[in-house]
């Protein structure tokens, strides 16, 4: 049974995560992983706001012709500071999984990153850095500097069952039609609008594709307001805890293969904000379970909601292209993102390659008050299978 409705969260097995063995988890923290919400904290549609206001509500027109509002080109001084911190870290021989603010010192850039973190978590929710010298530094030093940068925005969480805290978006030739088994980031297929299982996602472009692979983002709060006016029936369907999300076999011992949750839900406490957790690939891939009668199939209302949500996101989205050396950071709380399909250059040219970070921002450090038991865990969310240790490979595997 779910716990009673209170402003505080229960403290069950998360001691296992706060005191994880340091010989497995260098910082003593374990990614908490995927799990169902606290159902008593799921609010009915009538409790949701009629309209969302504030900096999280933005339109593509606000930024389309004003890149200075959402891009930051690294200065020579900032690059030098990142380079020095990366060289010092490499010289320490510390494993990449052990990087933190305490061993990646940025005396000047850190003040900018603190402000940026607040803007990502509570503001417009995105930035595009430019001029990261990946070709000069190579993959290893670039990964160190990139992860070091990320430590100022959140805590690394595992992105898959293998424990990858440094992920790699790259086409590995897997069959994108096998959506019940394959993670789409490991293919060149289109990614529909979605949010990842973390508070913040980062993407560093190492190599571009020949064609495609371009990025679209949208304020989910602008989408919410639009649906509230145009299709309140769809919005209501999205707020109901009738949605099943596939775990694609990335489960710990004794866990179910799916999670029942809402798509759009409210924070806990006073003046709750609207949070969106969505990925159509994880919803459409469950036919093996619905055909067996283990979970309900998608209803007509749900199928329509999927189509309407995607169409609305496309209509309202901001388009951007990531060049080599660009870094995109996004909020997963109130920004949805998508990617066009792409074609790589023919061999021996390198394939399109993005390094990915999933970052957590716990309640105690300004993160959203989510209706999940781990809301105040430092490494909340992500994907954790049993005691799989964190790893940070320098390329896709």
Image: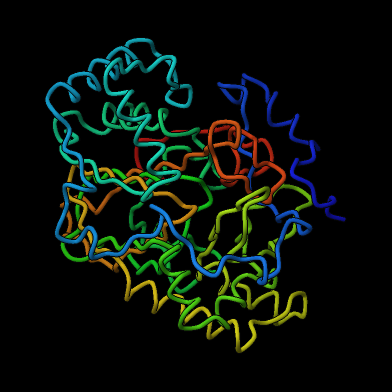
Q: Residue at x 32, y 71 (%)?
A: 316
Residue 227 image position (x, y, % from top left): 47, 77
Q: For residue 261, which quarter of the picture?
A: bottom right
Residue 369 image position (x, y, % from top left): 62, 45
Q: Residue at x 58, y 47 (%)?
A: 383
Q: Residue at x 63, y 58 (%)?
A: 249
Quadrant of the snapshot with the N terminus: bottom right
Q: Residue at x 62, y 32 (%)?
A: 30
Quadrant of the snapshot with the C terminus: top left
Total number of numbered discs in the rendering: 0
Q: For residue 200, which quarter of the picture?
A: top left
328 or 96: nearer the eye?
Answer: 328
Residue 305 image position (x, y, % from top left): 53, 81
200 or 175: nearer the eye?
Answer: 200
Residue 166 image position (x, y, % from top left): 42, 38
345 or 218: nearer the eye?
Answer: 218
């Amino acid at each position: 049974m779910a716990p009673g409705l209170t402003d505080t969260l229960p403290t069950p097995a998360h001691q296992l995560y706060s005191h994880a063995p340091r010989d497995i988890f260098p910082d003593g923290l374990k990614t908490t992983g995927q799990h169902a919400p606290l159902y008593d904290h799921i609010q009915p549609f009538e409790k949701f706001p009629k309209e969302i206001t504030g900096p999280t509500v933005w339109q593509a027109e606000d930024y389309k012709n004003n890149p200075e509002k959402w891009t930051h080109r690294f200065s020579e001084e900032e690059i030098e500071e990142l380079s020095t911190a990366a060289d010092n870290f490499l010289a320490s021989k510390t494993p990449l999984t052990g990087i933190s603010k305490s061993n990646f010192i940025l005396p000047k850039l850190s003040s900018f990153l603190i402000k940026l973190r607040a803007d990502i978590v509570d503001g417009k929710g995105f930035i595009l850095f430019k001029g990261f010298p990946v070709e000069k530094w190579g993959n290893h030093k670039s990964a160190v500097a990139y992860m070091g940068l990320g430590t100022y925005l959140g805590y690394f969480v595992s992105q898959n069952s293998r424990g990858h805290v440094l992920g790699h978006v790259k086409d590995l030739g897997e069959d994108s039609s096998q959506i019940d088994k394959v993670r789409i980031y490991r293919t060149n297929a289109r990614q529909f609008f979605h949010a990842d299982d973390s508070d913040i996602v980062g993407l560093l472009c190492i190599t571009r594709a020949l064609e495609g692979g371009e990025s679209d983002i949208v304020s989910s709060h602008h989408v919410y307001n639009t649906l509230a006016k145009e299709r309140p029936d769809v919005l209501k369907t999205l707020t109901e805890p009738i949605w099943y999300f596939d775990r694609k076999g990335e489960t710990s011992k004794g866990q179910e293969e799916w999670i029942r949750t809402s798509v759009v839900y409210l924070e806990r406490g006073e003046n709750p904000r609207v949070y969106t957790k969505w990925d159509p690939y994880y919803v459409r891939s469950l036919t093996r379970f619905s055909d067996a009668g283990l979970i309900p199939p998608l209803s007509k209302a749900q199928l329509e909601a999927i189509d309407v949500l995607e169409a609305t996101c496309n209509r309202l989205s901001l388009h951007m292209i990531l060049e080599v050396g660009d870094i995109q950071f996004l909020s997963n709380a109130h920004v949805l993102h998508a990617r066009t399909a792409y074609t790589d250059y023919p061999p021996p040219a390198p394939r399109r390659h993005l390094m990915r970070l999933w970052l957590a921002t716990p309640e105690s450090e300004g993160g959203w008050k989510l209706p999940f038991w781990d809301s105040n865990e430092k490494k909340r969310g992500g994907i954790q299978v049993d005691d799989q240790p964190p790893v940070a490979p320098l390329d896709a595997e």
